[in-house]
Amino acid sequence: MAGLLRRDVLGLALTAAALMLPLTAQAADPIKVGVTITQSPPGSVVQGTQVKDGLEVAAKMINDAGGVDGRKIELVIEDTQGLPEKARAAVEKLITRDKVVAITGEHQSSAALAGIEVAHRYKIPYINTNAWSDAIREKGYPEVFNPGNYNSRVGAAAAQTMKELGAKRVLSFAENTDYGIGLAKAIGESLKKIAPGIEYKYETLDRASKDFLPAILPLRANPPDAIINLMLPPAAYIMMNQVYEQGVAPSAKTWLYDGSGLADYPDFWQNVKEAGKGMLVFGLYHPKMAQPPLGKQVGEAYTAKTKNEPNRLLFQAADSLFLIADAIKRAKSTEPEALIKALGETKYTGTRGEITFSKDKGFAFNQWLDVPYVTFQLTQVNQKVGDSALVSQPGQPLDASKLWKPAK
């Protein structure tokens, strides 16, 4: 009888242990975060690579510190090629098949606009890393959070710079996407408010084209005071070279202002050479900017990983993942409703400053409004961003005494 009793007790203990194993394994399962980025043309592969690097750096830092409540972060990456239909399919797959707890990484507005529709339908948190279109915010979706830059911010910055340069006639070259056209319109609206005397227009160019001379050649006879680039590579590089080769900009008459922040792309100088000398840049990062300690840690980790200098997309991507991890910790859950609530209550000091999300309607909805930006000028070919002339610090007016202009 005693032997039978011991066997019964042992059997119950083994059964209990067996029941506990799945729970223990589940607790240790990684937290899957979906990532949609461009890894092949026609979208901006350079941007996609930089976002991927930033997310991987952040994931390693989180995991090396023990993960989130003991669980590792696992990135599940899908290539969208920057195309809306592929972004839509990628988000659908990540949610329904991969069972991710949140989506992040997107850096092209047309792809983000498609992806957020799927996230909204499934009510899954979507952290928009770098898609600037105001139309994303104006949807008013509670699942979508925007810690990156936005068109209205660039529009105001570009308009203010044009005013401080004393420009009278300004032309934007905008790619034929939600991003390009939306930003061109945002600049126009800002100019009406702060510099109504400036004559402004924009021309839409096909981002798949390699010949922009029909739009450029008429400028030789009557060049504007400034040309603003609102295009992404490779089209942006082609346009810049053709504008320079035709003697239009940068020149003694015409400023070239980059509203897309291309100067820190690793392939920038190999593609533009002399065409980039003298260009003014809207920048979301400059090594001479003040940064929180986390920003310095991420920058150092990125340089150790890639041997490249830090860039704006690195910090934007890292912040996107840090915000997800922070929300999970505060919510003590990976359930969508709890995460969305926690994200809405965010007050987190990331790589660029203290991030909070506005609940104002329109472009400000679920947007970090105080994204820091600078203006800097490239004065030499192959110049590193850190060696460029920082002509405007965050929140400060442009210092015209630091500007350089070609003699011809």
Image (tube, rainbow, N blue to C red):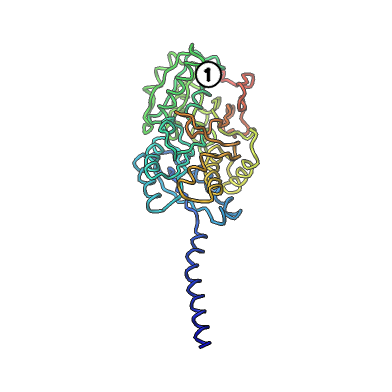
**Residue 100 pos. (x, y %):** 44, 51
Q: Which residue is mark 1?
A: 162
The furthest residue to the left: 85
Q: Is residue 57 visible?
A: no
Relative to 37, say whether 64 is above or below: below
Above or below, 97 against 231 in this view is: below
Name the residue nearer the viewer: 115 or 298. Answer: 115
Q: Quadrant of residue 205?
A: top left
Residue extending farthest front:
1
Whole-percent x and y of residue 142?
44, 38
Residue 187 visible within the image: yes
Mark 1 Cα shell of 10 Å, populated few (<14), some (14-19), many (≥20): many
Query: What's the residue type where badge 1 is placed?
Result: Met
Tell me how many marks there are: 1
Q: Nearer the viewer, residue 38 or 244?
A: 38
At mark 1, the secondary structure is helix
Residue at figure coordinates x 58%, y 39% from the top left? 347
Q: Which residue is drawn at the image coordinates 51% and 27% (left, top)?
A: 153
x, y percent for residue 128: 47, 39
Q: Is residue 293 left or right of residue 44?
A: right
In this picture, residue 28 sits left or right of residue 179: right
Residue 15 on image: x %, y %: 47, 74
- The residue lying toward the viewer, choosing from 263 and 83, is 83
- Quarter holding the C terminus is top right
User: In terms of depth relative to the viewer, which is nearer, 125 or 236?
Assistant: 125
* Residue 276 sits above or below residue 2 on the image: above
